[in-house]
Image: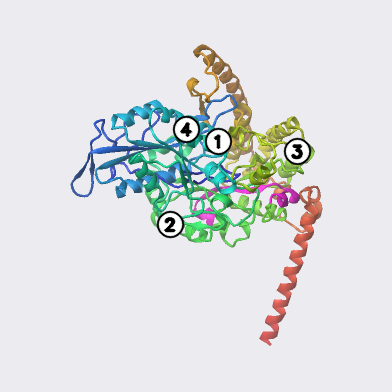
Amino acid sequence: MISHSIRVPAVALQDHRAHCDFGSRRAVGWIGSDHKQAAGTAPASGRSTRRGRGRPVTFKRTFHLVLVKPTHYDDDGYPITWLKSHIPSNTLAALYGLAEDCCRRGVLGPDVEIVVSPYDETNTRVRPERIVDRIKRDGGKGLVCLVGVQTNQFPRAVDLGRQFLAAGVPVALGGFHAAGCLTMLPAIPPEIQQAMDMGISIFAGEAEEGRLDIVLQDAWHSRLQRLYRYTEDLPGLEGVPTPALPAKALARNEGRRSSFDLGRGCPFQCSFCTIINVQGRKSRFRTADDLEQIVRENHRQGISSFFITDDNMARNRLWEQFFDRLIELKENEGISVQLIIQVDTQCHRIPNFIHKARWAGVYRVFIGLENINPDNLLAAKKRQNKITEYRRMLQAWHEAGASTWAGYIYGFPGDTRESVLRDIEIIKKELPLDILELFVLTPLPGSEDHQKLFRQGVWMDSDLNKFDLHHRVVHHATMSDQEFEQTYRDAWKAYYTPEHIETVARRHGAIKGRNPAEPAQFMTMFKIMFEAEGIHPLEGGILRLKYRRDRRYGMAIDPVGVFHLKLAIESWKKIKIYARLAWEGWRIGQKVKHDPNRHAYTDLALQPVVDDDFDKLALFAETAGGGAAVSKKRGEDLMRAKVAAQQNRQRLEAAE
């Protein structure tokens, strides 16, 4: 099941797709947070009518397929759920598409209606008792699939599964935690074995090529296996059902944004990454026709904003075909899209990549910067990252008008409090980066780092809920636990100062047609999530929802009065932080926006790259391994110059 690496969190019973087309040939329903029956779903009698192109089809029996993308718990044990969430679930879209295909093909027989109900718990409260009641009203046949379960979401997923099992509803669980553990560990780990012993079926692998059919048929015939293992066999992606969700399911995503993948797998060897071991090092791709189908299907329901979850779009060998197809749709039919993509630090060296990306609709890029110390990058086997290219790459995206967001990993053995805070200042001063996403180096199950620590018997925190890239789960080589955690908090605060928010706003304001208030708004949002909500900003959303009885299994349920008193005090504190920081960010944005001289602004990060940079910038002079990286770069440039000169001589000689 698909999930994504350190930058962005990600996918499973698979990160693919599942979609229901209201009013079409399938009578497939979507249940919102109120769990009322949606248009097109089966009536309570269990008998329903589906209209095809000819006569109506009458169903005698109903099977409920409930797809739940779990959230994870905050530090107080409450699920992190929002009125609107920022990051859409590719897993949910992927599984929904596969489920829709199962409906269309009638995999449970011509007289069985499959009612598919997707829930994203990051923006919808999941009420097991109501879902169970609905299944039982329609005859009691169904399956709850906990999809895209990452390691930090595993405790919450099991807690949900426990409630469904107690009511007699079968449960299956898939995602990167299960697939990663079964791929990289010598035996099934205790938490997965315990889930299986409870009665939860574990699905490890990708669900295309008829694998979801098998699970549904087993559930229908009450013969679910405890383990479905497909970790060694990676399916192709060409022509398979594509990811999509109905507009109603996307209504609680900020901006009604959806997501899909165009490729899986990665050829690199980063030791902290799970992608290369779960999705494989051999890349697999969808086609330009698949992409067009995704865009058209969403366009019909008014969806035009997408997050493409490929770990590295620049290494998708079909990138140009994809961008060209999107450009054709925009210019010939007026079908435009707004895209967020993930790329590596060498993407600017690919001819026309940035130009066509912007033309196709890319407005925001997540960049795997990871670190600015070459020694740390080598330790993580991130050899493809060259700090000598960072400035040129970021300037290229900035000049093209795209917003740049970069992941930065903290916690390498060579990190110290002083070096980390120094690096933050170097980034602020010398790199034209907008959003910096700090992540704690975490040995995620499925990664080489986790496998190595497991084999060595090194202590790792037993609470999987903390494996969210925001909590320390191992001891650092040189820093105490307290110093490590304080440095992480201070690094966030050091980047998101009012002064630097204004600097980033001015960098955008210097370009004609750009709104400097936009980066100020996003940076303020990140600051609010960290300071007010105490969570990683990528897990953020709009208006946090908290429910007394949804607390983590084994933790005490507060009395009604106590819970609401605590919630009122907490909310008042948050409101004050929200108001102060929002006012601060708004003032900065307006100040820069209305500055008559804003187009004349420049600073060191915006200065054109020149050879002298290698001798003058702290990025090269003060970072661990920076000097060696510069020497290597100069050696490579010299070699290329010699080869070019030799080729020129040969051409001249041939011409004579």
| Mark 2–mark 3 CB contact (< 8 Å) | no
What residue type is disc 3 on?
A: Leu
Judged from the image, the secondary structure of the residue bearing numbered disc 1 is helix
Estimate the x, y position of residue 623 in percent, counting from the top left: 78, 48
Q: Which mark is residue 191?
A: 1
Q: Earlier in the sequence, mark 2 or mark 1?
A: 1
Estimate the x, y position of residue 394 in percent, counting from the top left: 65, 51
| Mark 3–mark 4 CB contact (< 8 Å) | no
Question: Which residue does the numbered mark 2 point to in the structure image?
Answer: 331
Other residues around mark 1 within 10 Å, as few (<14) / some (14–19) / many (≥20): some
What residue type is disc 1 on?
A: Glu
C-alpha separation, residue under disc 2 versus residue under disc 1: 52 Å
Other residues around mark 3 within 10 Å, as few (<14) / some (14–19) / many (≥20): some
Q: In which quadrant of the rendered view does residue 459 lie?
A: top right
Question: Which residue does the numbered mark 4 point to in the structure image?
Answer: 198
Question: Which residue does the numbered mark 3 point to in the structure image?
Answer: 421
Position of residue 12 in the picture relative to residue 399 (left or right): left
- In the image, farthest residue toward the left: 55
Q: Would you place residue 522 above or below residue 329 in this image? A: above
Other residues around mark 2 within 10 Å, as few (<14) / some (14–19) / many (≥20): few
Foreground mark, 4 or 2, reads 4
Residue at 54% from the left image edge and 40% from the top image edge: 150
Q: Earlier in the sequence, mark 3 or mark 4?
A: 4
Magenta-tinted stretch? 356-380
Estimate the x, y position of residue 218 in percent, counting from the top left: 36, 43
| Mark 2–mark 1 CB contact (< 8 Å) | no
What residue type is disc 2 on?
A: Glu
Q: Would you place residue 110 above or below residue 252 in this image? A: below
